[in-house]
Image (cartoon, rainbow, N blue to C red):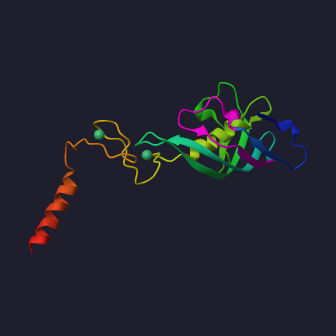
Amino acid sequence: MLFDLRKVHGDREHLQRTFEPGSFDPPDEDYRVASPAELSMDIEKADTDAFRVTGHVATRLELSCGRCLEPYEIPVDSSFELRYVPQVENAGEDEREIAEDDLTTAFYKDGALDVAEMLREQFQLALPMKPLCSDACRGLCSQCGANLNRTMCACTPTREDPRLAALKGLLDRQKEN
Ligand SMILES: [Zn+2]
Ligand SMILES: [Zn+2]
């Protein structure tokens, strides 16, 4: 969805919209938008061709657990503040204009702001470093592949965790005393 920046008359323009998950197709490989994204944002004219965008987006993203590979959802409830400047054709990374304030600089093209692209950027920022369905997720059995959160398989652990072995030794010794 493109927002025409020429519509920003006067000081500020308010935009309130709900984006169905399908608006973000094709899905990113790291997540899938699982519920409608509620966006509320204000676009303000900054200097000549720069715009300041302050907004908030709420939705749910479906990720895949890094241990058990099962899908699970996380809520997204993010506020953002960006400075949009026109994209200069063939501009290299170092030729980009440096903003005077601390705002993250984003680029618009042909007088329009790509709202879906801006939201994808926010979703990406909301992703956890390591996606886990739960901190206690037990993952998959390395031998039979069973999801250990759901079943107890009959495989015997190939190797005892050295830390557990040390702890067991300590407990045994305490029992003897
Ligand atoms: Zn998991
Ligand atoms: Zn197993």
Q: Position of residue 36 (x, y in %)?
A: 70, 43
Q: Residue at x 78, y 28 (%)?
A: 110
Residue located at (32% from left, 41% from top): 141
Q: Is residue 91 visible to us here?
A: yes
Quadrant including the N terminus: top right
Q: Residue furthest bottom?
A: 177
Q: Is residue 45 visible?
A: no
The image quadrant that residue 164 belongs to is: bottom left
Looking at the image, residue 93 sits to the left or right of residue 99; the answer is: left
Which residue sits furthest left?
A: 176
Q: Residue furthest top?
A: 90
**Picture quarter containing residue 35?**
top right
- Residue farthest toward the right in the current orientation of the protein: 10
Count of numbered circles in the view: 0
Q: Does residue 32 belong to the magenta stretch?
A: yes
**In-front residue for pair 94/136:** 136
Residue positioned 64% across, 28% down in the render: 91
Residue found at x 21% / y 56%: 163
Q: Position of residue 87 (x, y in %)?
A: 71, 32
User: Which quadrant would the C terminus be assigned to in this image?
Assistant: bottom left
Instruction: Check if residue 47 falls in the magenta segment.
Output: no
Chain part drawn in magenta: 21-43
Answer with left or right where residue 21 lies relative to residue 174: right
